[in-house]
Amino acid sequence: MSDRALFVVRAGALTTVQDRGRPGHAHLGVPRSGALDGPAAALANRLVGNLPESAVLETTLNGCALRPRSTVTVAVTGAPCPVAVDGRPASWAAPVHVPAGALLTVGAALSGVRSYVAVSGGVTVEPVLGSRSTDLLSGLGPPPLTDGAILPLGSPTPLPTLVDTAPQPAPPAELLLRVTLGPRNDWFTPEAVRDFTTRTFRVSSASNRIGLRTEGPALERRLKGELPSEGMVLGAVQVPPDGRPVVFLADHPTTGGYPVIGVVRAPDLPAAAQAVPGTPVRFLAVRRR
C-alpha cells in the first residue's frame, strides 16, 4: 500500500470526507452534499497548497486523531480548536508540518461545531458522481470515519502556499439569516409570517448535516391540507407539523411535502454550520434579487 495515506487513530463523534459536493443531480434524488462551511474548507486547502476541489475532513465537536504514513503539511480551520503533533501544541489556521508516523491531534471545538482538516495532496477516496463527499442522507460517498480506517492521499501539487495564516469569522453568537419569503409563505397566517421574521428562535440540538432545526415559537398554518411533494433547494426553510422551522443544509432531501416559508441566502449558510445548540437565530426578510 502507498505511503501516501492517513491512519485514523481516533475518528471522533462524526468525521466525514467532504469536498465541494456533487451539484446537478437533484433530478436523480441526489443532494449536493459537500462541506457545510465551504469557506473554511477552501481556506484549509489554500493553506496547504491544495487545489480548491481537494477533499478534506470535516469533524464535529470533538475532533479526531490521525497518523500520516509520510510527511505531510496539514491545516485545521473552521471551529477553533487545539492542534498538536505528538503532544506538542501546533498552530490552528496555519500550515503545520507533520512528520511520517507522528500523531496529529485535532481537539474539541472551543467554539463552533465543525473543524476542517486539509492534508497536502488531499484525501483521494473513490469519487461518486464526481465528488468524494460523504452524504449522510443518501449514503453516497465514503462512510463516516471509524477508528483504524486508512485514507489514501494524493500527491502534493506544485502550487505555492499563498498564505501562511489567515483570519476567519468567529462562530456566531447570534445567527442572522437573510431569507426571501416563499414559495409557500401564503400557507401560513399573517401572524406566523410576522413571528418568523421578527421573533428569535434557537438552534436545536437535533440539528445535523441535513438541516438546522430550531426551537421557539410554532408557526401556525393557514392552510391545513396536504402539499404534494415538490423540489427542495439548499437553504429552504421547511416548516414541519410542529411549526418549528428547519433550514435545509448540504445533505438535505431533494423533495419534500411540508411547506417552505422562505429560502436563506447561500452566503449565510456557512455560519449556520458553526452555530452550536442554543444559539439565537433570527430570520431577516429581504427582497428577491
Image (cartoon, rainbow, N blue to C red):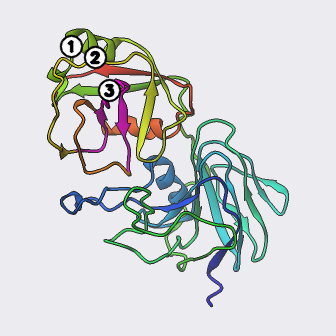
- Secondary structure state at the residue bearing disc 1: loop
Residue 178 numbered tag: 3
Distance from label 1 to label 3 (Cα)?
20 Å
Residue placed under numbered mark 1 in the picture: 189
Q: Is residue 221 visible?
A: yes
Residue 1: x percent and y percent? 62, 90
* Segment colored magenta: 232-250
Q: Residue at x 35, y 22 (%)?
A: 283
The residue to which callout 2 is attached is: 220
Q: Is residue 2 above or below residue 152?
A: below
Judging from the image, what secondary structure is the residue with disc 3 in? Answer: strand
- Identified by mark 3, the residue type is Arg
Nearer mark to the viewer, of 2 and 3: 2
* 87 lies left or right of 50: right
Residues at badges 1 and 3 in contact (C-beta under 8 Å)?
no
Q: Tell me the kind of residue under disc 1.
A: Thr
